[in-house]
Amino acid sequence: MQYLPKRFFQFLLFIVWSLTLIYLLSLSIVTLILLNICLFVFLFWLILTLIGWSIGFIPILTFVFIPWYRRHCRLWTLKEKQSRLSVAFFHPYCDNDHDQEQVLWYAIQSILRKYKHDVQILVYTGNRQVQSKDEVFQRIKRYFDIDLKSSKSSIEFIPLRSRFLLEKKYYKICTLLGQSIGSIIVSLEALIRFIPDIFIDTAGYSFTYLCFHYLASIPIISYVHSPAITSHLIQSTNDHDDYGKDNSILYQIELFYYQLITYVDRWCIRCAKVIYCNSSWTKKYLELTSAHVLYPPCDIEQFPDVIVTDRDPVFVSIGRFQKETQHELQIRTFNELLQRKSKDYPKLKLVLIGYSKRDEEKAYLEQLQLLVEDLNIQDKVVFKVNISFNETKAELAQAMVGLHTRKDQAFDINLVRMMAAGLIVLGHQSGGTQMDIIDDEQTGFLACDVDSYVTNMEKLMEMTNDERCDIHNHVRERIDRFNRLNFERFFTELFDKIFYISFCAFSMASKVIGKCEKNFIIRCLQDRQRFDRRLPFATRDIQIDFREEYGSVTVSLGLTKVLAQTSCRIVKPKETRPSEGRLRVQLKNSHAMVFNFETGRQAQWTTLMSRQLLQNIRESGCVDMESLCILAHEYVWEISVNLHVLDYDGNILDCGNLAALCALAHFRYPAVTVIGTDVHVHSITERNPQPVRILHFPIIITFALFKNGEYMLTDACEAEEKVMEGLFAVGMNQHKELSTLTMLGEISLNRTQIQNCISVAHHLVIDITKQMRSALEKNKEEQLKMIEAINHLDFIFGDTNWNSAHGEVYQLRGVFVNGRPSPTSVLVSPGTVSESKLHITTPSAVDRTRDHKFRDLDMLVW
C-alpha cells in the first residue's frame, strides 16, 4: 500500500508527459504545414511578381530603351558626317593565340579590306592587361602575321567586366550549364555597353544569341568551331559496366543533362542569320542544311613546297598541353615504337610542341614529364614549350612525321601546317580530321589506339621516297582549299548580303518601323493588299522627263526620283577587248537627309547597286560596244552614266536602271573622223552628234520577299523594304532574254517560285519598254517641232540689215544652244544686225543680254 501513491504519481507524470509530447508534435505538424503554406504562397506571389515585372519591363526594354540607345550608339559611329555600320565581334579572349583568335582577326581584316570607310569594328573583350591598341596589334602581328595598324581608327575594344563568369574554375559541377548561364549575363553587359548593327560570334558562345536576337533583333553571324557536346565529354557516362547501365539513375541523369545542353545549343544557333562551320563534321552535328562550311584560314603559303626525304625519323606533335590533346597517348605509343624499332632507328625522337600558360595546362605538362621519366625515355622525348612561330617552322623542317591524337576535333590548323611543311601526318580517326583533312593512305594515315598508331608509325618509317612523293602531291591538291584567300572570299560573300540588308534597314531609313507596323504590313500581304492600294505585282506610275542636255533625264517611280547624267571621253581600250568601247554606271547619293550620308560620298551600298546596274546593262549586250571604237588598240569612247538619287521611297534598283537606259538612249556623242592614225573630233557645230546604238532594253524587276518567300511583291516602297527579308531581282528584255538574276538576303526560292517571278517580270517588262519607247519618240518629235519652228523664221544674211524701227519681236518656242535643245522660249529683238550677229534676250535672264554669233549657235539646222 505504501507504493500506491508513488505509482499513481508516476502514472500521472507519464500521462502529462505523453499529452505534452502529443501537443508538441501536433503543434510542430501544424506549424510545419502553416510554414509550408506560407512559403508556397510567398513563392507563388514572388513568381507572379517576377512575371509581372518581366511583362512590364521587357516591353520597355525592347521597344523604348533599346531603340533609343541604338540611335545613341549609331551617333557614336559617325565619322566626318558619314554614318557607318557598326559590326561587333563577341570574343572575350581575343588576346590569346588559339585557332579561334586567328579566325577572329582574319574575319576583321577581310571586312576592313572591303568596307574600310563604311564600317566600325567593335570587339567585346574582357582583356584588362593590354593598355593600348598598339600592344594588341603587335601581338596580332607576332602571332598571326596580320597587320591592322593602318585600320586602327576603325577598330575599338569594349571591355567586359563579367568575363570571369565564363571560366571553368568557378563551376565545379555542371560546368557547361554554368558557363552557358554566365555567357548570357556577359551578353547582357555587352548589350548594355553598346548595341551594334551586326553581331558576329567567333568564340562559340551560342547562348549569347538569345539577348541580341530576342531583345535587340540584331542580325547574327555565327562561326561554330566545335560542338558543345563531344564524345570525350560523355566519356564518364560510358565508364559504367554494360550490366545495369540502362537502369543506373546517375547515367540517366547525366545523359539527360548532355542531351538538354545539346538541344538548347542547337536552338540558340538557329537564331543566327548566317551560320559558318569550320568543318563538315561540325555541320553534321548542327543538323542544319542552311549552315555553310568555311574552313579556318591556314597560313600554308609560309611553308615551302618541300618533300620530306632522307630525314631522321623524328615525330612532331603541335598542340596545347591539355588533356583533350592526349599527349599521354603519344608518349605511350612512342614508347611502344621504341621497344620495337630502337635498334633499327637509333635517332628516333619525339618532339612535343605546345603552349602552357594556364595553371591546369602547367599541371598537365608536369604530369607528362613525370610519365616520360617513369618510362625512362627522357633522351628520346623533347618538350618545346611556348616557342615562336619561326622556331616551330625550324622544327618542322627537321621532322619526318606529324603526329595528331586529339579525339573528335573539328579542325586542327596545326595539322594542316604540318601537311604544308611536307610531313607525312598520322591523325586520329575521328571528327574533322577524318572527314575534311586526312584521306586515309592518300594524304596521310589514321589511327585510333596504341596498336594502330604503332602499326602506322612503322609503315611510315619504311616508306620509300616515291611513296612519299605521291602522298605529297595529293596533299598539295587537298590543302589549297584551306588558304587565307578562300576564307576571305567565302566569308565576305555571305557577309555582303547581311551588310546590304542591315544598311538598307538602318542607314537608309528615315524612320524606324515598329513591330506593330511590321505585323500590319505582313497581314496586308496575306490579304493581297498594300499601303497605296496596289496589287502585289503592280508597279507605281513611271514618269520620264528629258532635260536640255543630251543624256540628261529624270525618272520618277512613285516618290523615288533619280537624275541620270551622261558624259563621254576618249580613252584607251582594255587589252582583252581592243575593239570595244567602255561603259561606266555609277550610283551617287545626293539626298543626304534620307540616307544620312554626306553629299558626294560613295557608300558601300551604292557600290553594290552600281555593280548590279552595270552588270545588267553591259553584260546583257544592249549597247553595241564595238560602235564606240574609234581606232582599235588606241582610242575608244568611254560612256559614263552618273545616277543621282533626288528622292527615295524604295526600289532604287529598278528606278536607277530605267534612268540609265533612258539616258543612254537620249545621249549623243561627237562625230569623229579617222585618217590613217590621225583622229579628229568634230564639234557639234561642224557635224551632228551621233546617238549611242541601243540594241534592246534590259529592264530590272525587283521582287521583295517575305516569310521565307511565301509572300512577294514588286516595286516595294520604303516601308515594305524595311520589313522584307530579301530581294530577288530579274533583268530581262521584251523578248524574255534574261540579263541578270540577283538574290539578296538569306532566303532561298524553289524552281516554281523563280519561274513565276520570271513570268510576272516579263509582262511588266513589256509594258515598261513600251512606255519608255513612247517617251523617247515623244521627245524626238518635240525636237523636230523646235527645228521646224526655227526654220520658218525669215532671217536675212549678207549686207542686209534689220531696221529696229519695225518693232517686231520673234518668240521661239525652242532653240538649240550649244547643240542642246532649250525648252524655254527665246525673245529675238530686232535691231541693226550686221552680217552674222543676233541680239538675244532670254526670259530667265531678262536683265542681261548676250551677243551670239550664228556660227556658235546650232539653231539654224536647214
Image (tube, rainbow, N blue to C red):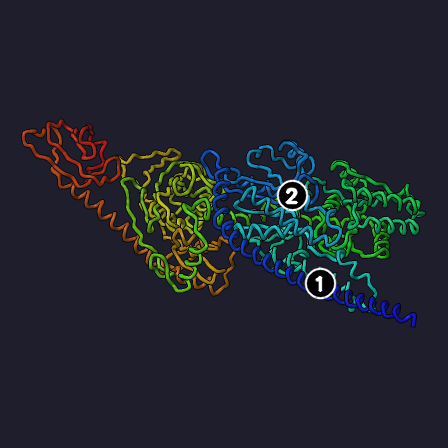
On screen, residue 818 versus residue 336, left or right, reads left
User: Please, is residue 255 above or below residue 511 in the view?
Assistant: below
User: Which residue is denoted by mark 2 in the rendering?
Assistant: 162
Toward the front, the furthest residue is 1
Q: What residue is drawn where x is 62% and y is 50%?
A: 184
Q: Is residue 554 visible?
A: yes
Q: What residue is drawn where x is 53% and y is 44%?
A: 196
Residue 172: image location, x then y, percent? 75, 51
Residue 510: image location, x then y, percent? 40, 45
What is the quadrant of residue 264 in the picture? bottom right
Q: Mark 2 Cα within 10 Å, few/some/many (few <14, many 20+)?
A: some
Q: Foreground: 44 or 699?
A: 44
Toward the left, the furthest residue is 805
* CA separation in Å, label 2 and label 1: 29 Å
On screen, residue 540 versus residue 516, left or right, reads left
Q: Secondary structure at mark 1?
A: helix
Q: Give the residue type at disc 2.
A: Ser
Q: Which quarter shows the N terminus?
A: bottom right
Q: Mark 1 Cα within 10 Å, few/some/many (few <14, many 20+)?
A: few
Q: Foreground: 385 or 144?
A: 385
User: Which residue is denoted by mark 1 in the rendering?
Assistant: 256
Q: Give the residue type at disc 1.
A: Phe
N-terminal label among 2 and 1: 2
Q: Foreground: 664 or 511?
A: 511
Q: Secondary structure at mark 2?
A: helix
